[in-house]
Image (spheres, rainbow, N blue to C red):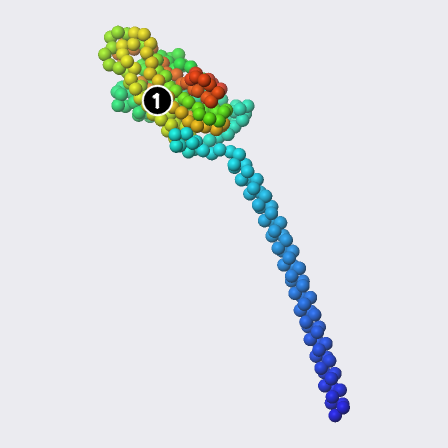
Amino acid sequence: MMQRRSVCALALGIAITALSFVEGSGFALAQDQQAATQKQLDRIEQKLDTLIERLGTAGQQSSNGNDSLPATGNDGARKQVSAEGDTSQGYQRGALAIARVAPARKDNLPEIPADSVGSFVYIGGAIPLSELSRNGVVYPGLAAVELQGWLKVTQPGRTQLAVEYLATTGSNVFGNAGCIASLWLEDRSIGSQHGEIPMPAREQKTVSFLFGADLQPGLYKLRAWLACTEPRDLRVLNAQLLIKTPADMNLRMIDSGELLHQGS
C-alpha cells in the first residue's frame, strides 16, 4: 500500500513538473510574439509619421500657390514663373499676332476665320489693321488680328485690359464701322464687346472696350480677337491693347515685357 502511494505521488510530481514546463514555454512564446508584434507596430508608426510629414509638406506647397482665376466668376489654372526666368523657360517677349481677313459685315464680327494671311510678333503699341504690310504681312485689304500668348502679372489685384480702335476716313462715308474685342484668359472668356466708330472720321475717332480680372502673380494664357468692318474711304484704322495694373493710376499701352509667347 505504501509503495502504491509513493508511485502515485511520483507520477503526480512528474505531471506537475511537465505542466509547469509547458506553461512556461507558452508564456515565453507569447512574450516573443508580443515583442515581434510591437516591433512591427513601431515600423508601421514610423512609416505613417514619414507619410504624414510628406503630406504636410505637399499641402503647404499647394496652399502657397493659387490655381484660381476669380475675376468675373471664372476659374482656371495658371503657370507660375519667376520674373527673371521667362526667357530661360522658352518664353520670348511679345505675343503672336495672327492676321486674318476682316469681316465684311457686322454680323460676322464674332466669327474668327480659319485661314490667316500672315503673322508677326506684337510687342505693344498700335496695330495698323489697314496697313499690316508695315509688320511684314502681305495683304492689301483691311485685316483683323488674333493675339495669342501669355500675360505676365507681377502684382496681385485687379488687372484691367482695354482695346482701343482709332480710325480716320475721308468725307465720302455713309455708314459707321463696326468693331469687336473679345478676350480670353486661360481659355475662359472675360468678355466680348462690340460697338461702332461714328463716320465720317475726317478727324481721328475712337471706340474703346474695357475688361477686368482679379489675378495673382504669374503667367496667364491670353487670347484676343480684334476686328472691325471696313468703312468706305478708309485712310487709317489702328488697334491697340492697353493695360492698367494695380500699380497704375491710368490705362497705358502694354509693353513687350508684359506679353510673352513660346518660341521654338
Q: Which residue is mark 1?
A: 181
- Residue for point 26% across, 20% down: 105
Name which residue lies at 70% across and 74% down. Answer: 20
Q: Nearer the viewer, residue 148 or 25?
A: 25
Res 71 quadrant in image: top left
On the rendered image, what quadrant is the N terminus found in?
A: bottom right
Where residue 102 appears, x then y in whole percent?
Answer: 31, 19
Residue placed most toward the observer, 95 or 258: 258
Answer left or right for 179 relative to 19: left
For residue 14, what is the image quadrant?
A: bottom right
- SS category of the residue bearing label 1: strand
What residue type is disc 1 on? Answer: Ala
What crowding class fits label 1: few (fewer than 14 Cα within 10 Å), some (14-19), or many (20 or more)? many
Foreground of the two, 25 or 213: 213
Can the viewer see residue 181? yes
x%, y% of residue 138? Answer: 36, 15
Residue found 71% across the figure and 73% down from its top: 21
Q: Residue 8: horizontal and vertical position, in percent?
A: 72, 86
